Amino acid sequence: MEVDNSHGTLINKSEENDFEKKGTSDPVVYQLVRVEGDGTLVPATEDDVLQFEHFLHNDEKVDLPSIEDVGHVEEFFNNDCMLLKKPDLEDGSSKLETVEVHTQKLGADLEENRLQSLDDSLSPPSECRVIHSQHSDKLLTEQGDNVTRQDNASTETTKSTVLNESCSAEKDKADACSRPVCDTSTDPSVSGVNSSMPDFSILRGEVCLDDLTIRELQEAFRATFGRQTTVKDKIWLKRRITMGLTNSYDVPSSGCVVKDYKIVGKDAKKDISDMDERSKIGLRATSLVIYPGNDGDSPSSSYYQSEDQQDSSKRVERVQIHNDEPQGNLLGKQCTNKRTRKPTKRYIEELSDIETHDSTVKISSPAKRPAHDEVLMKPRVAPFNEADSLGTIYPTRKDTLGGFSVHVPYVSRMRRGRPRKDFISFADKEPSVEPKGIQTAVEVILEKDGDKGNHLRKAPEVPVKVSSEKGHIEAVDSEGVRNLQAKLYSAVAKPKINRGLTRKHHRAWTLCEVVKLVDGVARFGAGKWSEIRKLSFASYSYRTSVDLKDKWRNLIRATKTQLPAQKDQGACPRKINPSIIPIPPSILLRVKELNELQSQGGGFTAPVKFSGQDRKVLQGKGSGFL
DNA sequence: GTTAGGG
DNA sequence: CCCTAAC
C-alpha cells in the first residue's frame, strides 16, 4: 500500500495514464477522506490514514467477513473517515460508499492465491470486506483482484477493503432489489448537499458521452468515480467513464452510449458475445462491481473476472455481464459454471490421436477398423446380433463393400498386418470347408487393404457374410467357419482394450544415445537390454529395452548397408537422406566389431541365431577385424 | 518381465 | 515403433 501521508490520501500505485497503457492496472485512485457533518469531504489527516491502515491490518487475519467485521468497519468509517463519499440522490444525504486500498504487489499475490484455489468449490467470500449501505444508489468502484466473491480466499492476504452494500452472493441476491438487509449500523445520513457533490444526474438514463463537453465529461467522471479529474482528454475521459459505468475494459474509444450502466450501441453485442465466450472457458466472477439502480431498473451487475492461465500469467480481464435475470440466477450460473481446466498436453495428444484414428477409419475398409473403435466409435448402422447355428451370438454391423451389403462381425483386432502363421495354417488345414463366398469376401478385403496395414490397425481377417439383393452368398453353417469364428471370437474374448490407442512419440536416436548403446553392448553384451537400459539409459526414460534391441538391430543393419563394404564396393549406393544424420563410420565399425565378436560366441552373450546368409556375410567381413 | 523376431 | 511368441 502506498500511503501518501503528505496529502492524507491512500492512492493506488497505478496512475491513470499508466492504466491506459497497461490495461490491467486499477484505473481507480482512491482517496481517503473525512466526511464532515455537513457532508463535505475533507482530506483525511495523517491520523486518519494511520487509523485506517491499522484497521486494515487488523482485519487482515480475519478469514470471513463476519457481520461484526462489517459493522466494525462501518462504524469506524461512520465515525471517522471514509475513502469515498457519495451523496444519495434521493435525499441528498452523504453516504460512504467504497473503500479500497490496493497495491500491485497485492494483486500479484492474489493472482497466485487464485491459482491455488482454482478448482475449489464455491467458498464464501472471505476477504471481501464489505460495508452495507442503506442507500439505493450505488456506485461501486473497486479493484477486481482484491475483491473476491467466489474464489477461495482463505489464503488471500488482501488488504483490500470494500465498503459496499453486499458482501456475498447471498446478500447480492437479497439486496438486489430491496437493499438494507444486513445493515448493522445506524444510518449516519448526513444532511445537506454541498457544492462538492457530483452531478449524478448526468449519469442517469442514456448517456452519450460523445455529446458531452470536457467539463461535462469531467463532471461525469466525478459522478462515476467520486473524485475529480483534471484530465482534459476527451477520449480518455469518455473511455474512463464508460469503463467506470460499465466496469468493462472492453470499451470503445468513442461512439458508445451508456444506459443504465450498460453499454448500448455499437459494441453492446460484442460485449455480450465476449462475455459468453469467456464464460465458456470457465471464468469465475471475482467481485461484484456495479449496482446500477437509481430507479430500480432491472439489476445488472458487472464482475471482474479473471481467467486463470496455466502459465501463471497475470492476465486479468474485466468482463461485463449483461443480464436481465435476477441476480440470483446470474450468480447461480456463475457458481455452477465451474472452471474448466485446460486439457493437459497428454490429454490433447490422446484426443488428437483418436481424431486421427477417426479420420483414418472413415477412409478405410471396415475390416480395418481399429479394435478400440469398438469402444470409441459408434457404428454407422445400429448393430444387431447374429447367431450362428450353435447359438453363439456375435455382434455384427452392416456395411457396404463393393456394392454388397456386408455383415461384419464386431471383433477386436488382435493382430495387425498379415494373418498369423497359425491362422493360415489353421485355415489351410480345412480348405475344403471354406466357403467360396467367404473366401471371396476376405480376399476383397485383403486386397483392399493392400499392404498399408503397417500403419493401420486392421481388424482380424474374419469370415464375413455377404448378401446382396439378388443373390445370397451365405456361408454360415459350415463347420470350418464355425471353428474359425469360434477361434477368432475366443481370441476376442480377452481383448486388450488400450492396445494401439496411443503410439509412442517418435524420438530420433541421437548420436549420444547410440554411443551409449554401443558402450552398453560392449559392457553387458547384446541381449542384455534390460541391464543396458538400467545402467546406461537411466536418464532416457523413454527408451525401453525393446527400443534398445531394435536400435541395435538397426545399427547392425546399418553396418551392412552404410559401411563401405570392402568387398562389394558400390553395391548399394543408396541415396543419402540429408535430413538423417548418418552414424559415423567409426561407431558403425565398433558396432560391427561388437556384433561379430559377440555373435561368434567369443563373448559372454547368449548365442545369436543367424540365417545362413548372415553368417556367411558376417564371417566374411569379420575376419578382417578379428 | 524380458527378449527375439516379424512387421 | 508395434506386436506377438517364447521364455
Image (cartoon, coloured by chain):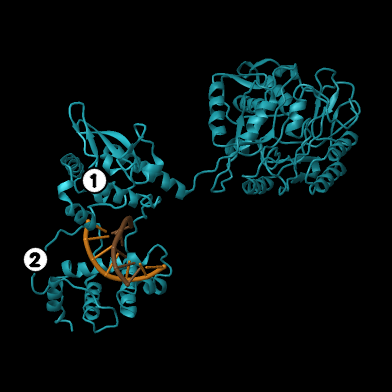
Chain colours: A cyan, B orange, C brown
Q: Secondary structure at mark 1?
A: helix
Please report, as a chain letter, where disc 2 is located. A
Closer-to-camera residue (A143/A591): A591
Write the residue at 28% across / 52% down. Answer: A416
Residue A29 drawn at (x, y percent): 71, 36
Q: Amino acid at mark 2?
A: Ala
Query: In this rendering, would A624 be left or right of A456?
Result: left
Label annotation for residue A85: none
Closer-to-camera residue (A134/A554): A554
Q: Amino acid at mark 1?
A: Val
Write the residue at 54% across / 47% down. Answer: A310
- The image shows residue A15, relative to residue A272, as above or below, that is below
Label annotation for residue A571: 2
Residue A234 drawn at (x, y percent): 62, 24
Query: In this rendering, would A614 be left or right of A605?
Result: left
Choose top left, top right, bottom left or bottom right for residue A276.
Answer: top right
- The image shows residue A446, relative to residue A214, as above or below, that is below
Closer-to-camera residue (A68/A607): A607
Which residue does the numbered mark 1 point to in the structure image? A481
* Dot placed on the residue nearer the N-terminal end, 2 or 1: 1
